[in-house]
Amino acid sequence: MTAAADAGLPGGHELIATALEVARAAAALVRDRARGEVSVASIKSSDTDVVTEVDRAAEELIRGLLGRLRPGDAVHGEEGEDLAGSTGVRWVLDPIDGTVNFLYGIPQYAVSVAAQVLVPGAPEAGTVAGVVIDVAAGTEYAAFVRPDGEISATRDGRSLRVRGPAPLSQRLVATGFSYDAGVRELQAQALVRLLPRVRDIRRFGSCALDLCHVAEGRFDGYVEEGVNLWDHAAAALVARGAGARVEVTRGAGGGEAVVCAPEHGFDELRQAVAEAGYLAT
């Protein structure tokens, strides 16, 4: 039995169907709007941190569906105000992870929906179900915590597994860059130090998809500072269910950072990215 079940809260196996339903609806909206003209609706933390009307429309759609399917649940989304709840369940939403890619027509962006439960007495909410949909490709990554506490992680219904062991010098690592220019400079310096130690580094622009690519063995690891809960809540569960370890820590620039790698190689990669200067000391 999981802690959520012991507390009388719904488990991941009960919430995954709702997560899939709302994520699919949002992905269909984003896919349809991508055929038309996409423009910036506003900026957030910097001139490069943008929001489109499609981001807002997709999140409004998800919130509306959740209000009908799961009334009383809390909602924490990137584009809207937090909604308090009374059920012990909180939904964490990113209507488009990879908005800049979406704006430029680069087919690397995703809808991310996670369900968390707050167990009485626990310090923080835990993700029990998550869905990431690669909108352009139509690929669905899903994960949920089973009643026995194990995590089921799938891509289009088929089980996922991380890539097998490899020397650090043969690992392909994904990363991303902050919207803050000062942090980007630190990240660039760290990248220069890490690059000679690994096979290569990739930057695709979606934290959620990068984590899912670790889960399916396309990448051997991932590190990025400047992410938020909605970027990784669902995808981290997918990665963990496929055999990866995910650590949320503090980056060298003071922001939230995520490090992910297969469990068998996590410690070595984490040490390498720390030595390169990605993480706070």
Image (tube, rainbow, N blue to C red):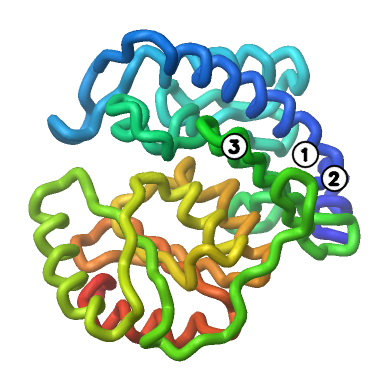
Q: Which residue is drawn at 40% across and 80% down?
A: 270
Q: In which quarter of the image is the N terminus?
A: bottom right
- Residue 274 is situated, as x and y percent measured from the top left of the image, at 29, 80
Q: In this view, does 179 lie to the left or right of 159?
A: left
Q: Nearer the viewer, mark 3 or mark 2?
A: 3
Q: Which amino acid does label 3 sit on?
A: Ile
- The mark that comes first in sequence, 3 or 2, is 2
Above or below — where is 143 with respect to 22? below
- Report which quarter residue 51 is drawn in: top left
- Residue 233 is situated, as x and y percent measured from the top left of the image, at 55, 48
Q: Are marks 3 and 2 in contact (CB under 8 Å)?
A: no
The residue labelled by disc 3 is 133
- Report how far apart the C-alphas of labels 3 and 1 lie in the structure: 13 Å
- Residue 65 is situated, as x and y percent measured from the top left of the image, at 68, 15
Query: Does any portion of residue 116 appear in the rendered image?
Result: no
Query: Does any portion of residue 31 appear in the rendered image?
Result: yes
Q: Residue at x 60, y 62 (%)?
A: 215
Q: Are marks 1 and 2 in contact (CB under 8 Å)?
A: yes
**Dot label at residue 13:** 2
Q: Are marks 3 and 1 in contact (CB under 8 Å)?
A: no
- The secondary element bearing badge 2 is classed as helix
- Report how far apart the C-alphas of labels 3 and 2 lie in the structure: 18 Å
The residue labelled by disc 1 is 16
Badge 1 crowding class, 10 Å Cα cut-off, few under 14, some 14 to 19, many 20 or more, is many
